[in-house]
Amino acid sequence: MTASRSARERKAASQAGPLATVKIEVDANDQFVYKITCAECIAKGHRKWSAYRPGGDNGFMAAMDRWIFHLHEKHPGSDAPCMAYLAAAQQRLHERREQQEAEQA
């Protein structure tokens, strides 16, 4: 049995830590889209910083990786369980960049 959307939201929120607000929406293809918002940072004007990228990869891993990088850069020392995966997120970013370079060559 797969977890409900609300159960996935609670799990993601617990991993993201106290600075995060997690919302999961369903896109046109019936895929879950994760939006992680920072309670402290402002991105543009009055809008809060979020890991959501319109049209991009907003699955759990991609959104959580962006959130981990945000915490690492803007909130060093943050006490969020997801920070245990910083090295893995950096490795995935490195692999993605290498793949993009290979495709451009």
Image: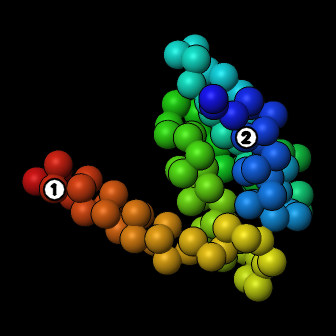
Secondary structure type for disc 2: helix
Tell me if mark 2 has few (under 14), some (14-19) or many (20+) residues whose alpha carbon lies within 10 angstroms of its own.
Answer: some
Q: Which mark is residue 17?
A: none
Q: Which image quadrant is residue 58 in? A: top right
Image quarter in which the C terminus is found = bottom left
Note whether 59 is above or below 92 in the view shown: above
Is residue 62 found left or right of 103 in the rendered image? right
Secondary structure type for disc 1: helix
Give coordinates of residue 43: x percent, y percent.
76, 54
Whole-angstrom CA distance, mark 2 to mark 1, is 35 Å
Give coordinates of residue 23: x percent, y percent.
78, 38
Is residue 59 found left or right of 83 in the rendered image? left
**Viewer-nearest residue: 55 or 2:** 2
Q: Residue at x 66, y 60 (%)?
A: 67
Instruction: Say what amino acid the circle numbered 2 marks.
Output: Arg
Note whether 39 is above or below 83 in the view shown: above
Give coordinates of residue 31: x percent, y percent.
56, 25
Q: Residue at x 80, y 58 (%)?
A: 14
Note whether 38 is above or below 4 in the view shown: below
Query: Which mark is in front, 2 or 1?
Result: 2
Residue hosting label 2: 8
Q: Residue at x 59, y 46 (%)?
A: 60
Lower sequence index among marks 2 and 1 = 2
Q: Which mark is residue 102?
A: 1
Tell me if mark 1 has few (under 14), some (14-19) or many (20+) residues whose alpha carbon lies within 10 angstroms of its own.
Answer: few
Q: Which image quadrant is residue 28 in? A: top right
Please say whether residue 64 is visible from this viewpoint: yes
Q: Residue at x 49, y 40 (%)?
A: 57
Instruction: Say what amino acid the circle numbered 1 marks.
Output: Ala
Furthest residue to the left? Answer: 105
- How is this picture coloured? rainbow
Please say whether residue 44 is visible from this viewpoint: no
